[in-house]
Image (cartoon, rainbow, N blue to C red):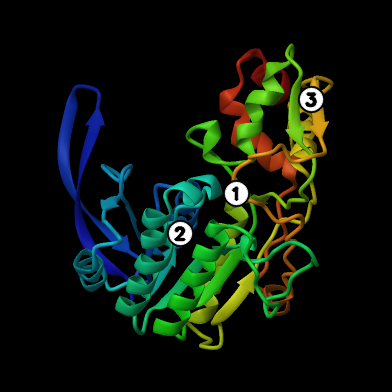
């Protein structure tokens, strides 16, 4: 069932302007995306929007004018949004996801990552909720990690997300948890992702730069994660067994140093100034797992996985607007 609504449109032709009323079809399937202003949330919102879903995004600091401003730690505000919009699905992307920030601002991070997630799950009784979680729930000593392996987070961020998972599943047993690793995609600023932030070091060129070469990571493109969320949501509308814990991950294993070299290569830039740093410097912030590789067989067996777009292709799409040397665009695209 599609709903019809009237929309006012302005038609311009040379020397003539008229306002007309047109019918617009509104898809009947409704999805609420929290954290829609963030790196992953923007991709999730766009993926549903472009595939016959009526999407409502909410954010906080960056919400207006495109999205609804909603403080997720305010129970009444959350209840009002859900009652007004009546979504079939909620994808909960909002989180404090910077491990070093969580270490220092623990209370605010717990409010968002744990308590707000619990509230959302409670208010979303009867609605399919996907809670985005992290590979940092594991200690990284014995990879790969399956959905049923015992979590053992090393830092406060990992602990907060694990606690959030448990709150969500306690209040809403039909919910799904989707754990993903380090994310990147089309950023508003390069420091919005721990992958794209390497761009500044790559473009330095003249100055030598040391880059971390200890932890094994699996950079994962937000557009791929967004497709997985949509496929899970669409399957769930037919199949109530889509619930519990799922893993999704890119397949290319790299340290940050290797990512920086791959980024340089994707743009035909030199990487000889990049120096691999094989020891963690003292006082390097929150402890990170050595290798928290996620084993993703549950999605694969259900036919809900997505073949990842290759790192160099996706990182090129994400970073080309930030080139200092705009001439590069001509050489690559012509």
Q: At x 67% / y 66%, what residue is drawn?
A: 138
Q: Nearer the viewer, mark 2 or mark 3?
A: 3
> Left or right of 189: which side holds 245?
right
Is residue 239 at least partly visible in the picture?
Answer: yes
The earlier-in-sequence mark between 2 and 3 is: 2
Mark 3, residues whose alpha carbon is within 10 Å: few (<14), some, or many (≥20)? Answer: many
Mark 1, residues whose alpha carbon is within 10 Å: few (<14), some, or many (≥20)? Answer: some
Check contact, mark 2 vs mark 1: CB within 8 A: no
Residue 57 coordinates in the image, percent (x, y):
35, 56
Mark identifier at residue 93: 2
Could you say whether the residue bearing mark 3 is in a helix, strand or loop? Answer: strand
Check contact, mark 2 vs mark 3: CB within 8 A: no
Mark identifier at residue 274: 3
> Left or right of 254: which side holds 103?
left
Q: At x 40% / y 72%, what residue is drawn?
A: 89
Mark identifier at residue 100: none
Real-space Cα separation, disc 2 to disc 1, in angstroms? 22 Å
Residue 89's place in the image compared with 260, above or below, is: below
Real-space Cα separation, disc 3 to disc 1, in angstroms? 24 Å
Q: At x 63% / y 24%, what residue is drawn?
A: 200
């Amino acid at each position: 069932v599609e709903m019809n609504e009237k929309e006012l449109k302005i038609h311009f032709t040379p020397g003539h302007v008229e306002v007309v009323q047109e019918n617009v079809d509104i898809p009947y399937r409704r999805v609420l995306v929290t954290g829609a202003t963030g790196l992953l949330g923007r991709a999730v919102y766009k993926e549903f929007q472009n595939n016959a879903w009526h999407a409502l995004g909410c954010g906080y600091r960056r919400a207006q004018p495109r999205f609804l401003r909603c403080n997720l730690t305010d129970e009444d505000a959350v209840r009002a949004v859900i009652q007004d919009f009546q979504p079939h699905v909620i994808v909960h992307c909002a989180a404090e996801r910077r491990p070093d920030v969580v270490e220092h601002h623990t209370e605010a991070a717990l409010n968002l990552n744990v308590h707000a997630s619990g509230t959302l799950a409670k208010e979303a009784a009867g609605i399919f909720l996907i809670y985005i979680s992290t590979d940092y729930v594991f200690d990284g000593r014995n990879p790969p990690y399956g959905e049923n392996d015992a979590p053992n987070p090393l830092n406060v961020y990992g602990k907060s997300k694990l606690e959030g998972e448990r709150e969500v599943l306690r209040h809403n047993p039909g919910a799904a948890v989707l754990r993903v690793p380090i994310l990147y995609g089309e950023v508003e600023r390069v420091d919005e992702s721990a992958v794209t932030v390497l761009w500044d070091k790559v473009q330095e060129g003249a100055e030598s730069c040391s880059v971390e070469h200890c932890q094994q990571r699996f950079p994962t493109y937000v557009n791929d994660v967004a497709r997985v969320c949509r496929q899970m949501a669409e399957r769930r509308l037919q199949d109530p067994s889509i619930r519990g814990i799922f893993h999704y991950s890119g397949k290319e294993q790299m340290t940050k140093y290797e990512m920086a070299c791959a980024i340089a290569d994707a743009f035909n830039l030199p990487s000889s100034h990049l120096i691999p740093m094989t020891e963690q410097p003292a006082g390097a912030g929150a402890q990170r797992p050595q290798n928290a590789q996620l084993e993703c067989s549950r999605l694969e067996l259900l036919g809900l996985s997505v073949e990842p777009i290759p790192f160099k292709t996706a990182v090129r799409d994400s970073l080309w607007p930030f080139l200092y040397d705009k001439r590069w665009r001509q050489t690559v695209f012509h």
